[in-house]
Image (tube, coloured by chain):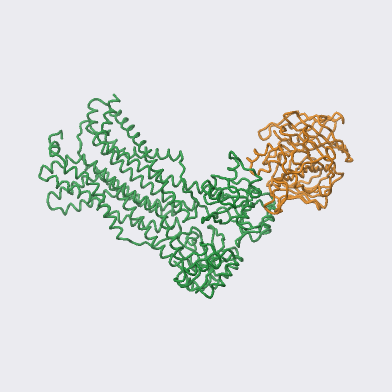
Amino acid sequence: MNVRTLLVSLLMLCPIQGWAQGFAGLGGSAEGFDIPQAGYAFDFPKDHGPHPGFRIEWWYLTANLTDDKGRDYGIQWTLFRSALKPFEAEGWQSPQIWMGHAAATTPTGHFFAERLSRGGIGQAGVTAQPFEAWIDEWRMAGADMDTLTLTANGNDFGYELSLAAQGPLVFHGDAGYSVKSADGQASFYYSQPFYSVQGVLQLRDGDVQVTGQGWLDREWSSQPLAADQSGWDWFSLSFDDGDKLMAFRLRGGRGDFTSATWINSDGSTEAIPNGSIRLTPLSSDEVAGREVPTQWRVLLADRDIDVEVSAQTPDAWMGTRFEYWEGPVTVTGSHDGVGYLEMTGY
Amino acid sequence: MTLAIVQALLSHWRAHWLQLATLLIGIALATGLWSAVQAINAEARASYARANAQLALGQFDELRDPSGPIPLGRYIELRRAGWQVAAVLEGPYRISGRTLRVMGVDMVAYPTLPAMTETEQSATPPDPADVLTAPGRLLASAELAPLLRNQDNLPPVLVTSALPPDLILTDIGVAEDLLNQQGMVSRLIVLPNQPRNLPPLPQIAPELVRVSTSSQIDTAQLTDSFHLNLSAFGLLSFAVGLFIVNGTVGLAFAQRRGMIRTLRALGVPMQRLVWLILTELTLLALIGGIMGLILGFFLAGALLPDVAATLRGLYGAPVTGQLTLQLQWILAGVAMAVLGTLAASGHALWRLARMPLLAGPGVQTWQGNIKARGLAAVVGISMILGGALAYLSVGGLIAGFLLLAGLLTGAALVLPTLLSGALTALSRTATGPVAQWVWADMRAQLPGLSLALMALLLALAANVGVSTMVSSFRLTFVGWLDQRLTSELYLTAQDEDQGREITNWLHPQVVAILPIRNVELSHKTGPLFLYGVVDDPVYRQHWPLISSTPNVWDNVVAGEAVLINEQLARRANLWPGDDLTLTPVHILPIAGVYSDYGNPTGQAIVSMEQLDLIAPGTEARRFGIRLAPENASGMAQALRDRFDLPPRAVVQQAAMKAQSLAVFEKTFVVTSALNVLTLGVAGFAILTSLLTLWTQRLPQIAPVWALGLNRAQLARLELLRSVLLAVLTACLALPLGLVLAWVLLAVINVQAFGWRLPMFLFPWDWLWLALLTLLAALIAAALPALRMLRLPPADLLRVFANER
C-alpha cells in the first residue's frame, strides 16, 4: 500500500473537520520529524511497532472473502497513527493521535465505522512483540505477525477473523523505500500479502462463515505527497495462479506518477518504475453524489497483464471524516483474480 | 382631495401636540415594556441554549461515579470494551476573586464539540497540534478572554461565542493541570452511535451510574417559570399601555367629530376618511413602536444584569449581562405596536364610522351601555371560573398562570358593574339635588372611564399581590436563614489532610465542629445531593422542618431514616412515611421534610455513617464551626493566619447571610421595577381618560352651572369624582391583590420553584399604596379641574347657543 490513505491520516490530525483546511496543504517541510532514507535496514519485529518520530504511519489490512455459497465479501481494518509532534508522552500529553477505520462489504451493501483516540492513555496503540494493534475494542493481535486474530465492530456490522501468513514479507520500491513523486517524496513500505483468512462476519441478517485471503500493508513517512498531487488510485490484486500485483497512480497537476510491485507466488518481487504500468478508468458510477470510476483497465505490458478490474459493490464509499472509496474488486481478462481498490480525491 | 383631507386631519395634531405626545408615549410605553421583557427572555434563553449545547446537557446520557471522580483507567477499560464515551474533567477555578468553571473534554474522543466546531470554522482556525499538546489552548467567551489573557501561567486564549460566561473549555490534558487532578475524570459523556455487542455497564464498571438525559438539570426548563413570570408582567404593562392609547385616541376622535362632520358635509366619502385615519394610526403606531423599541432596548440593557444575577443566584443558570439586538425582536415589537394600537383604537374608529352625519358631540347614550356592561360582567365571571377550572382540572405551572390571567382579566371586566352597583347604592344616600346629580353624573361617566379604571385595578392588584408575595418571601427567607445558618463560621480546607489538621487544632477551642460532606446522586426526578450530618443539638433545635414524624432526629442519626428538602418532596410527591431510593441498594424511609429556599435541586440528609456506606470516600473538606459568636471574627482570622487559607475559605455566618440576602434582593429588583412602572402607566391612563371625557363634559356641566353652581364648586366636584372612583377601585383592588398574592405563593411558587410560602399581610403597605393611588387620581384630575376653574363663562353659555 502506499500514499493511499495518506490524506486520511493527515486529516485525522484534525479531530474537527474544518481544521483540515489548514492541513490539506501539508506538502511543505516536515519540521522535527524523521525523513525516510534509502538503504534503511529494517529491524523486525521492532519495525512492526510504531515509529513516533515519523508523522504518519498505518497498519492496513484488507481481505477478499467468500462464504460457502460462493458469495464475495470484503473487509477492511486500518489503524492510522498521526503525530502532532515527533515524540511520544505519557497520559493526555501524548501528541500521537490514532484513528481506526473498519468496513465490511457484502454483495449488497457496505458498512463502515471510525474510531479516534489519543496515544499515551492506552486507548489505542501498537506493540511489536507480541504483536498487538488496537483502538477501543478493535484489535489485530498475535504472538507474531504470522498468526493474527482480527476484530472490529460498528453499530451495524462486526467481524472476528483469524489470519495465517502463507509466505514472506515483501518490500516495495527500493527494498522498502517507496518513492511517491518525481520530486523524491518517499515512504517506508512493506506488505504481508499472503494471509489465508477464515472466520465470521456479523451482519444484519446474521453471522456468515467466510474464508479467503488477506493483505496487510505497513507504511510510514513524514512528507510523502508532492504539493500538486490531489488524489490517488491504488490496487492490490491477487491472481488465481498465486502471483500478485500492487500498483498505484498519484494524480498530479504535473502529470500522473505511477509505481507498482510484481510479487511472485514465492514472495520474490520486482519493482516496476514510474510510467511502466497503465491504469485507465473504463466506466464510473455515481457514489455518494460523485462520479467514481468503478471499472478499470490495468495494463502491464512487460508481464503480459491486460485485465479489467471491476468493483464487486460499487457503493463501497467510506463516509468517514475524510471520505474515500475502498472495496473488493474482481479481476478478469488475461489473468483472473480478486483484489482491493482504493480511490481518493473524487 | 386626499391632500386636503390629510391636511385637515393633521391640523388636529398641530393644535393638540400634547395629545400627540401622549399617544406616542402610550404606544412607546406599551411596546417598550413588552419588548424589554422579550429581549431579556430571549437573551437568557440563548444563554441556556449555549450552555446546554456546550455541556452536552440534554443531548447525551452520562456515566458518573456517585462517590467521586472516575480514574482514567476506568475510561480506558470502557473504551476498550467498545463503549463510545468521552471523558470530561471539570471543576471550579479561581482567578482574581472570580470563580470560573474549567471544563476539560477529551477533544479527540468528542470532536464535534460545538464550541470547537465554531472556533475551527473561524477565519484563523487553530492548529490542532496547539490545542491538543502543551501548553494547549483555552476557549472562553469574549467577556472572559481579557481576564484570562492577563494571567501569566495560563495557555493562550481562543475566543468563541458558543460558550456561556464563566466557563473555560479546554482539552482534558490542560484541565488536568489547571485543576491539579492528574489521571481523573469527572464524568463520561455517552456518545451516540454505539457499536453492536456492547457488554453491559455493570460488567465493566459496576460503580458507575448511567444518568439519562431526562434526569439531568435542564436550565431552560428550570427557569421557564421565571420567564413566564416576566412575560406576564410584560403583557400586563402592554395592556396597561394600550389603555393610554385607547384613552388618547378616543379623545382625539371625540375632538375631531366637528371637523369630520364638516368634511363629510363637504362630500368626503366616509370610507376614504376611515382609510386615511387607519393609515394615520398605523404611521403613529410605527413611530411610537420604534420609540418603544429604543426604550425597550435600553430598559432591557439596564435590567439584564440584575436578571442575570437573579438567574445565577436562583438556578445557577449562566446568563450574560450583555444584550444583543435581533431583527426578529424588532419586527415583533413593531408588529405588537401596530396591532395593539389598531386594537385599542378600533372602538373609537367604529363609532366614528357609524356616526350619523348630523349628530352633535357629547350626547352620552349611557343607557345603551348597560347591556354591554352586563355582558362584560358575565364574560368576566366566566373567565374567573374558567381559570379556576383549568387549574383544578389540569394543574401545573401553565394552568397556574391561566388561573392568574382569568382572575385578573375577569375581575377587570366585572369592575364596571361593581362600580356601577356601588355608585347606585351610594346615590340612595344622597339627600340634596347636587349630591344626586354628582352620583348620577359619575355613573354617566363610568363607561368612558371604565377602561382607565380597569388599568388602575390591574396595576393596583398586581402591586398588592406582588409586594405581598415578595415581602412574605423575604420574611420567611430571613427566618429560614437564621435557622439554617447555625454555625458561626464556615470553613473550606484545601484538601482532606488539611481538613483533619484544622479539626484537630480547633477541637479544644470551639463548641462543635460539624463536617459538611455531600455527594451527587440521581433520582428519577433529577439530580439529588445527599448530605451527611453528625448528631448535634443545633440541628435538633433549629433545622427548619415543615413536616416530620415523631423522633425524627433520633431516627436520622441512627441511620434509619432520611430527611428530604421540600423541592424533592413536591417534585417526587414523597412525604414522611414514604421511602426514598438513594441507590438501588439504599432505600430509606423519609422522616421529615425541610424547607430549602433558593435551591433548584433535590436534596436529602442522612447520618454521616449512612453517607459513608452509600458513597464511601466522600471528601471531608468543609466544616461548620460553632463557637461563641463574639469570638467568630478572631477565630476566622486565626484560622486564615495559621493555615494560610485564602480569605474566601473561612466565611462568617453574618457575611453569608448578607450575601444570601443580597442575592434575594436582586431577585426581585426586576419585579419591583416593573411594578412601579405599571402603576405609573395606569395613572397616566386615568389622566388621558379624564381628558377625553372633558370634551364631552361641557354640555353636561353647562346646565348645572346655569342652575347656580359656580366654577370653583364644579372644579372641586371634578376632583372629588376622580378621587372617589379611584378609591372605589382601590377598595376592589385590595381583595383582588390578596387573592393574586395567594395564587403566587401557594400555586405559582410551588409549581415554579418547588416551595410553598406562608402568606403574611402588610396593612401599612396597603395604606401607603392607597395614598399613592389618591395622589395619582388627584394629579390626573387636576388638569381637567384647572380647566374648569379657568373656563370662560362664554364657553359654557355657548353650549346653549349651539346646535345642541
Q: Is residue B675 above or below residue B282?
A: below
Q: Quadrant for the C terminus of chain B, please.
A: top left
Residue plotted at (15% across, 50% down): B435
* Chain that appears orange: A
Relative image position of residue B77 (x, y in whole percent): 69, 56
Quick check: can you spot residue B80?
Answer: no
Q: Nearer the viewer, residue A262 or B405?
A: A262
From this viewpoint, which residue is outermost toward the bottom? Answer: B508
Relative image position of residue A86 (x, y in whole percent): 73, 46
* Chain that appears green: B
Q: Quadrant for the N terminus of chain B, please.
A: top left
Name which quarter of the figure residue B475 lies in.
bottom left
Q: Is residue B106 above or below residue B695?
A: below
Relative image position of residue B721 (x, y in whole percent): 20, 49
Relative image position of residue B487 (x, y in whole percent): 48, 69
B614 to the left or right of B689: right
